[in-house]
Amino acid sequence: MPSLVTVGGVGDFYGIAEIADAMGLSRQLVAVWRKRRSHGIPEPDAELASGPIWRRETVEPWIERTRGRLGLAGARESASRSLRLRTCRRVLRLAALMLEEPQRPRVLNEAADQLRDLIHEVDQAADDVVGALLRELIEPVRDPDAPAELLRVPVIESLPLVTAVARNSPDW
């Protein structure tokens, strides 16, 4: 069965945590809003054992409206610890797969797609040092038509950026 949910609210689905991250609020607050049906939070599109999920098209318009109403629509937030870790892990995984012999094109392309799933979220991060580093880290996979096998050199060359992200993240 194909994976329907990607972590971090990218891809097609959001959970409570992803909504909270997108709004710069705590998970607890968003969970309370959902339980109380306050702030106009839409009904989830599905319930999993781990909790409710919303389709991007259901929840993103609500997030934008609510951020505006609450005065949260100002400057972009710095990249969350979760986003920094997910991005770095996916880059490292892709690099490790590229060093395997023999290479497995299907697995490489899946790993590149998982990293591509973070592009939207990384692009929403603030224009601070860490945000710039994360955007540079994902740069090699921005072209969705580029086969992963051709990304070996750019991905391997980007590995020092993982260290730079760590050095510029006090909560690493």
Image (cartoon, rainbow, N blue to C red):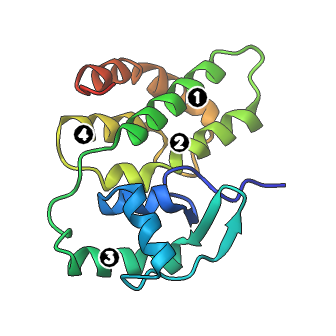
**Looking at the figure, which quarter contains the C terminus?**
top left
Q: Which residue carries the number 1 mark?
A: 94
Q: Secondary structure at mark 4?
A: helix
Q: Which residue carries the number 3 mark?
A: 64
Q: Are marks 2 and 4 in contact (CB under 8 Å)?
A: no
Residue 133: give x, y in percent of width and height: 28, 34
Q: Secondary structure at mark 1?
A: helix
Disc ID at residue 115 = 2
Within 10 Å of disc 1 (Cα), the crowding (few <14, some 14-19, many 20+) is many
| Spatial CA span between label 4 and label 1 | 20 Å
- Residue type at tag 3: Glu
Query: Which residue is most to the bottom?
Result: 40
Pick whichever of labels 3 and 1 is earlier in the sequence.
3
Residue 78: give x, y in percent of width and height: 24, 46
| Spatial CA span between label 3 and label 4 | 23 Å
Q: Which residue carries the number 4 mark?
A: 132
